[in-house]
Amino acid sequence: MQSHGVLLPLRGPSSSLSLSRHLRRQLTLTSFHSSKASTRPRSLLLPVASAAFTVSDGELETRGFRVRRSSDGLDVAALNDVFARVGFPRRDPDRLRRALGHAGGAVVWVEESKRGGGPGKPVAFARATGDGVFNAVVWDVVVEPSLQGMGLGRAVMERLVADLRRSGVSNIALYAEPRVVGFYRPLGFAADPDGIKGMVYSRRNQKKR
Amino acid sequence: MPFGASIPSPPPTYLVHHLACWFQVSNKCWIHNGLSGFVPAKRRAMVLPLRASFWDSIKSGFLKNNNSTKVVEPPSTFMEEEDPFPQDIVLLEKTQPDGTFEQIIFSSAGDVDVYDVQALCDKVGWPRRPLTKIAASLKNSYLVATLHLIKGIDQKQLIGMARATSDHAFNATIWDVLVDPSYQGQGLGKALVEQLIRVLLQRDIGNITLFADNKVVDFYKNLGFEADPEGIKGMFWYPRY
């Protein structure tokens, strides 16, 4: 059912897009991809309201981390510092604020609690852009290098995915560098499903005619 | 075969973007030949005269830096041209034998009827999606581009569409590129995507991405897209097939 020049959405013509959300959830529960089994697959398949995260908000609080679900209070300069430390390019702060404030996007970040209160620095971060009903793409997933390996990246990703799913979006995509493909797999992400390729526009690739 | 002489003066509501091109077609290609309207032409490749200086000023989307270098994105180099790009662009013009004037217009205005979108999705064989969701997806898209076939003065038909979501600053992702099957094979899909890219770059969105089904990867490669750049993989959350 594919035509030349048609970019299919992930789930294509054979998808269940036209089904009600309830029925879709039933399908999700019964057609689980066992090849992508992770330690806690079911937590991502339960109705979102009772989803159990690997590490709960409360557990994070006892360790001195607070989960934040909006960009309010996010120190953009501090976030840029984290970007730089993980090897991402720093962003122009105004453009970064614009990207964060854009309606329809989702932001989850972890704040390191500061002694004596006050806003803490971001130590983990992820954001998504999309149309709010069908598709979302996750960008800029970072964890402060000195705090990696503790489950903070998983914490932001689980919550971001849960937030997107709660708003009805189930087509969630991202671009993963080779060395982090393994990080996303246990979170439920699969690379090139059914041969679908992530592609990026590059001016130098444009054919001269 | 020399290319036709001049394009007649355009109707007042559109700025005709003289693309200096003709479309790759089996037997339905028209080259404008002076005042006698369109004549059939041999198959040719499509050419869009892009302005080199403008493209060169846009940075590539992926930057890899080590920790020690500070890279700050340059301030927006928006609009170095004097005249702004029009929202509507005439891709094709034709005068039918009976005198009817036809045009295929690209528009980035996103002015589209949700019922027309659903009808187009039906034509390409997609399953039905709730109209409210279609409407919401269009409203929440950063850019909605359309191809309309204009016949005479009052017939306007949606024959192609593409949309892009974006964070309004860095990244855009193209979704749902559709061309009415009756109008496929004429290079309209390519024109649609090329114009969409042009508008995104014009708005300083430097990283343009998409996810391509296996069968259309080459189509997008020909438009300047690269699959798995630097080994970066597209991944999806629990895809069901």
Image (cartoon, coloured by chain):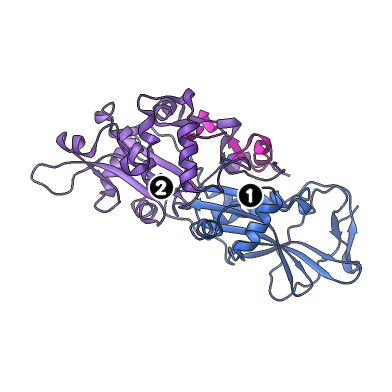
Chain colours: A purple, B blue
Amino acid marked by disc 1: Val
The answer to whether residue A47 of the structure is visible from this angle is: yes
Q: How many marks?
A: 2
- Seen in the picture, residue A101 relative to B213 is either above or below; the reply is below
Q: Is B233 colored magenta in this rendering?
A: yes
Across and down, in percent, residue B97 comes to 91, 67
Residue at screen point 14% across, 49% down: A118
Residue under pointer 2:
B73
In percent of width and height, residue B127 lies at 63, 48
Span colored in magenta: B212-241
Q: Is residue B50 visible?
A: no
Name the quadrant of the N terminus of chain A. top right
Was residue B239 drawn as part of the magenta stretch in this picture?
A: yes
Amino acid type, mark 2: Glu
Corner quadrant of residue B146: bottom right
At numbered mark 1, what does the secondary structure look like: helix, strand or loop? strand
Could you tell which of marks 1 and 2 lies nearer the N-terminus? Answer: 2
What residue is pinned by disc 1? Answer: B177
Expressed as whole percent of the image width and height from the top left, the position of residue B149 reads 74, 63
Image quadrant assignment for residue A181? top left
State which quarter of the image contains the C terminus of chain A. Answer: top right
Q: Residue at x 79, y 52 (%)?
A: B23
Q: Residues within 10 Å of mark 1 (few under 14, many from 20)?
A: many
